[in-house]
Amino acid sequence: MSSESHLPDEIARIARILADPMRLHLLTIIARAGEISCTHLVDDADVGASTVSYHVKMLTEAELVTVAVDGRRRYVRFEREVLRHFTELLAHSVDRGTSQRALHALPRSWASDGETPNLLCSRRT
């Protein structure tokens, strides 16, 4: 199995991790700081240490952050290149999926009447 066949699974895995509002909030705090101590992260996020610990663990598993230990202190570092790589994979997947065959998937009624379909987000006149 090629690595490209794992692409949708990898995108979905990271997207699920980023979909959680608390994880996204924490990642934003970490990204703005570049690197932040866990103590400051708990203070800035205004949530409990166990909540931060759980979500940092998830972000670490997705490799979006790394944790460095310095004595008794732990520092969380944002891995900008990993997020950049994820967005590139997502864009590539979307670009690759938007092909002629996607146009053939449109309902026949859209193409048969020669008119633009009435979409929910279209402007009605």
Image (spheres, rainbow, N blue to C red):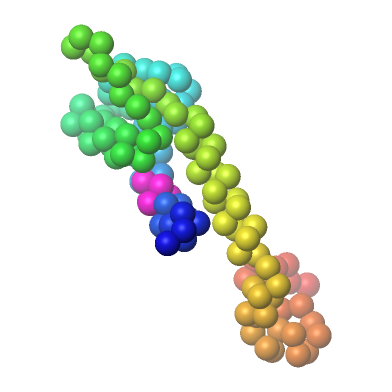
Q: Residue at x 25, y 16 (%)?
A: 69
Res 95 → quadrant: bottom right
Question: With 57 as the anchor, is 101 left or right in this view?
Answer: right
Q: Is residue 14 magenta?
A: yes
> Against 7, is 23 above or below?
above
Q: Residue at x 40, y 18 (%)?
A: 35
Question: With 69 as the anchor, is 20 left or right in this view?
Answer: right
Which x, y percent locates residue 30? 41, 25
> Against 94, is 122 above or below?
below
Q: Is residue 23 visible?
A: no
Q: Residue furthest front?
A: 1
Which x, y percent locates residue 11? 45, 52
Q: Which residues are magenta?
A: 12-17
Q: Which of 75/117 is in front?
A: 75
> Against 44, is 50 above or below?
below
Which x, y percent locates residue 54? 23, 36
Q: Residue at x 76, y 90 (%)?
A: 112
Q: Residue at x 54, y 48 (%)?
A: 89
Q: Which of 108/118 is in front?
A: 108
> Against 97, is 74 above or below?
above
Q: Which of 96/26 is in front?
A: 96
Which x, y percent locates residue 39? 26, 17
